[in-house]
């Protein structure tokens, strides 16, 4: 049987073998954390503690005021030292609550709910919201918001995204291997919260053991289906995943999964949801794949939010000959300008590339119109035209070529034989024009 | 273990952070390589003169590229293989007896005018090699339509003047062609193997297809343009071609095989009409481009002033490539659903 997939896409080398055999280990408890007050798309949090305050592990330190937002919590117990600014992976300075650990890891009182699957949808969403859960695949959209679709957009399918199509990353893979039961409990909670009868788990077929582990765990669940997907980037992009599994196409020009009755959550998010709804645990840690040929000992680590990147890399033997350190995967991640930067809820991986692996943008050449980018664009766009027009400063004309339907997966820049920085040209055009 | 790098040492650039190993140079040199069988065939069929003419073209093309980039202080692109390819293709498109000035001037026009004056690789509208050939054909029509019979031996110096199969077909009819080659099967065989008069690299269908297979397997070209081009010529020459019995026009009486295997059709369809820069990028547009090339080729061959029409048909369709790309957009993901709503 042909595996579910979408049209277009590319096959970059997976490189997952570097870290995939390493079970998730708990990172050393950090002596100090800097919990960013903005870790998600949406409004930043207001700090609710001040320097000198004593906080417990899991205590709210930043409150979300807006609807599209999520609170942040202390990831160690100890004393608040400062509200100080640290860069985020995109290079912007973000205020952070700096907490010095007392080494106790004393939790706030957690209320366990044994009957968590019979909670009302409203109660579930409230608990998810209070736990500060955001999408952990990297986009960090507040989860509770995703779970509140308007009435005119009924949702009938919940999907867990275990595709992990970014090369190198193995965080989601390890979670599915090691904790498939809890991930599926998270899915059941999501189905309950949305009143949905059908749940899917999409996993790329280069992880057959994860497919097997999840299938075994889902054997008793009649309404949950584990779908192996063709190995193809960007299979884990929400729209591509939905197309592959249900055949539904999210409308262009700003359409959302809920427009076709689907809600997608990352498998890591599902685990966090389970921890939050069942045990009352806020999101204070996540699995981070530390990998690449530039790091001494690639690993999958459970890292507290707010731990310095430098500290995480140090625990993996440090950098060897890394020339570029990326937060996230090589296709859509961000190159870091400093390692003195906190891990956030969206940090799926820390990837260290060596000099020989880095393609320098200064070497790019004119477009030869070979059409490779056109053939592989999962959105059916003409990246060649977007890059040529943007390079010429014709930003408005880019809209004729559906500029704003590009979600910057980078497939075009990957295949371009002229090594053109197409994603950069697209971002430039987007920033110079208004959608519409 | 080394200490963490200081921020200054970290490279910061935009995603994606990994790229495929394909490059323009790799593609161009592979195309050059794929022409090697047909080039070797040209030396076999027409003697060392084939090597001489082609080498002149390549050297002149490289010189033209170097000169323009030197004068305009643009980055040097000699190593990307594209100027070499233009020279090689032009050489393969010239008659074996071409004088040196035709080879040199043709190459200089191709690279300096058709390519560099438009901005260099990626910006030219017309296929440079074909532009160079069109220029010398119009300027020196006599020399460009003087053909030599294949000698199939490396020692031959003085080759005999003859007509090309398409020339015979056009001027004197099919019976003359059969007379010259003996029988229909002998005619087919000579056309397929390449033992016939014609431009240097265009005569051997067999050797050209070997090269084309390499490009298709490496996915450097797709079937869209060559197949639609060749199929269109086949169908139209079958419908409108000369009837072997009467020698005149009879619908559905033509012999498409002669047309497919003679002239520059195979060389043009697989190696010139597939030039990325001068053809549409959308696959559906490429099929239109190929069909257009086929129609124009047949019109020129059957009713035009030249026995051969591949060069002009590709150049004419080059004009339409940008237009075709504008009209033939690929379907945007999620678009149809919005229209329906």
Image (spheres, rainbow, N blue to C red):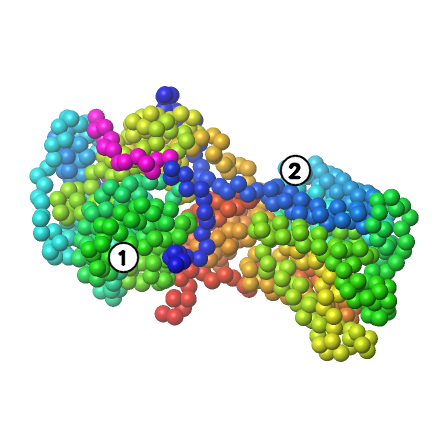
Up the image or down, A217 lies above or below B60; here it is below
**In the image, is A320 to the left or to the right of B315?**
left
| Most frequent secondary structure within the magenta stretch | loop
Q: How many marks?
A: 2
Judged from the image, the secondary structure of the residue bearing numbered disc 2 is helix
The answer to whether residue A264 of the structure is visible from this angle is no
Q: Residue at x 46, y 40 (%)?
A: B18
Q: Which of A397 and B235 is in front in this view?
A: B235
Q: Name the residue under label 2.
A: B79
For the C terminus of chain B, give its image quadrant: bottom left
The location of residue A346, given as percent across then percent down, is 29, 42
The location of residue A317, given as percent across then percent down, is 33, 25
Q: How crowded is mark 1: few (under 14 residues within 10 Å), some or many (20 or more)?
A: some
The location of residue B301, given as percent across then percent down, is 77, 67
Up the image or down, A316 lies above or below A88; here it is above
**In the image, is B110 to the left or to the right of A120?**
right
**In the image, is A124 to the left or to the right of A162?**
left
Highlighted range, magenta: A18-38
Chain letter for mark 2: B
Up the image or down, A422 lies above or below B79; here it is below
Q: Nearer the viewer, residue B196 or A187?
A: B196
For the N terminus of chain B, give its image quadrant: top left
Q: Residue at x 22, y 54 (%)?
A: A219
Which of the 4 quarters of the picture holds residue A353? top left
Q: Which residue is drawn at 10% across and 37% down?
A: A108
Q: Name the residue under label 1.
A: A225
The answer to whether residue A185 of the structure is visible from this angle is yes
Which of the 4 quarters of the picture holds residue A340? top left
Q: How crowded is mark 2: few (under 14 residues within 10 Å), some or many (20 or more)?
A: few
Magenta segment includes B261: no
């Amino acid at each position: 049987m042909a595996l579910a997939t979408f049209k277009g896409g590319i096959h970059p080398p997976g490189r997952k073998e570097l870290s995939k055999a390493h079970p998730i280990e708990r990172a050393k408890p950090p002596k100090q954390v800097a919990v960013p007050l903005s870790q998600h798309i949406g409004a930043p949090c207001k700090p609710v503690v001040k320097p000198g305050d004593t906080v417990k592990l899991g205590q709210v330190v930043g409150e979300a005021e807006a609807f599209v937002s999520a609170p942040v919590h202390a990831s160690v117990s100890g004393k608040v030292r400062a509200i100080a600014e640290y860069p985020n992976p995109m290079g912007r300075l973000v205020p952070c609550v700096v907490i010095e650990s007392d080494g106790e890891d004393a939790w706030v009182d957690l209320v366990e709910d044994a009957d968590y699957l019979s909670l009302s949808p409203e109660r579930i969403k409230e608990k998810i919201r209070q736990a500060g859960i955001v999408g952990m695949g990297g986009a960090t959209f507040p989860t509770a918001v995703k779970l509140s679709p308007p009435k005119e957009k009924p949702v009938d399918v919940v999907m867990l995204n275990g595709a992990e199509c970014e090369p190198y990353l193995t965080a989601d893979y390890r979670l599915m291997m090691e904790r498939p039961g809890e991930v599926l409990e998270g899915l059941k909670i999501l189905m309950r919260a949305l009143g949905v009868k059908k749940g899917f788990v999409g996993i790329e077929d280069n992880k057959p053991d994860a497919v097997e582990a999840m299938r075994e765990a889902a054997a008793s669940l009649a309404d949950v289906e584990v779908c192996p997907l063709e190995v193809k980037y960007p299979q884990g992009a929400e729209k591509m995943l939905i197309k592959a599994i249900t055949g539904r196409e999210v409308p262009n020009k700003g359409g959302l999964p809920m427009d076709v009755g689907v809600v997608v959550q990352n498998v890591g998010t599902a685990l966090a949801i389970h921890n939050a709804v069942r045990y009352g645990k806020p999101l204070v840690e996540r699995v981070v794949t530390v990998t690449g040929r530039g790091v001494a000992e690639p690993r999958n680590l459970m890292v507290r939010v707010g731990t310095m990147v430098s500290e995480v890399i140090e625990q993996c033997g440090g950098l060897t000959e890394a020339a570029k350190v990326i937060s996230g995967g090589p296709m859509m991640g961000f190159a870091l300008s400093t390692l003195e930067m906190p891990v956030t809820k969206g940090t799926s991986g820390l990837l260290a590339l060596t000099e020989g692996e880095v393609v320098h943008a200064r070497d790019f050449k004119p477009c030869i119109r070979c059409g490779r980018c056109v053939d592989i664009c999962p959105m059916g766009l003409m990246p060649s035209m977007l890059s040529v027009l943007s390079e010429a400063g014709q930003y408005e004309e880019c809209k004729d070529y559906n500029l704003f339907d590009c979600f910057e997966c980078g497939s075009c820049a990957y295949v371009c034989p002229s090594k053109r920085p197409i994603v950069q040209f697209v971002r430039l055009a987007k920033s110079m024009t208004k959608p519409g | 273990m080394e200490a963490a790098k200081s921020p200054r040492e970290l490279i910061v650039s935009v995603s994606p952070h990994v790229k495929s190993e394909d490059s323009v140079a790799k593609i161009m040199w592979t195309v050059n390589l794929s022409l090697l069988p047909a080039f070797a065939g040209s030396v076999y069929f027409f003697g060392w003169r084939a090597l001489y003419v082609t080498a002149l073209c390549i050297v002149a093309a490289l010189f033209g590229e170097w000169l323009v980039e030197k004068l305009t202080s643009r980055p040097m692109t000699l190593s990307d293989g594209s100027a070499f390819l233009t020279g090689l293709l032009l050489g393969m498109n010239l008659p074996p007896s071409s004088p040196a000035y035709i080879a040199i001037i043709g190459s200089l026009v191709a690279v300096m005018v058709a390519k560099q004056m438009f901005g260099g690789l990626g910006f030219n509208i017309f296929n440079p090699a074909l532009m160079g050939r069109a220029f010398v054909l119009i300027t020196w029509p006599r020399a460009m339509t003087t053909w030599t019979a294949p000698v199939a031996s490396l020692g031959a110096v003085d080759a005999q003047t003859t007509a090309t199969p398409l020339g015979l077909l056009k001027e004197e009819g099919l019976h003359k062609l059969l007379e010259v080659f003996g029988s229909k099967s002998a005619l087919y065989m000579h056309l397929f193997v390449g033992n016939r008069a014609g431009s240097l690299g265009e005569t051997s269908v067999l050797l050209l297809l070997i090269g084309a297979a390499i490009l298709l397997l490496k996915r450097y070209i797709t079937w869209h343009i060559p197949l639609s081009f060749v199929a269109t010529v086949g169908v139209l020459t079958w419908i409108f071609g000369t009837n072997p019995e009467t020698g005149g026009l009879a619908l559905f009486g033509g012999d498409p095989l002669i047309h497919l295997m003679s002239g520059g059709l195979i060389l043009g369809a697989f190696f010139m009409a597939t030039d990325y820069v001068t053809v549409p990028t959308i696959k559906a547009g490429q099929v239109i481009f190929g069909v257009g090339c086929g129609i124009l080729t047949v019109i020129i061959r059957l009713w035009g002033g030249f026995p051969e029409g591949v060069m002009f048909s590709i150049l004419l369709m080059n004009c339409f490539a940008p237009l075709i790309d504008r009209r033939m957009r690929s379907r945007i993901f999620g678009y149809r659903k919005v229209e329906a709503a």
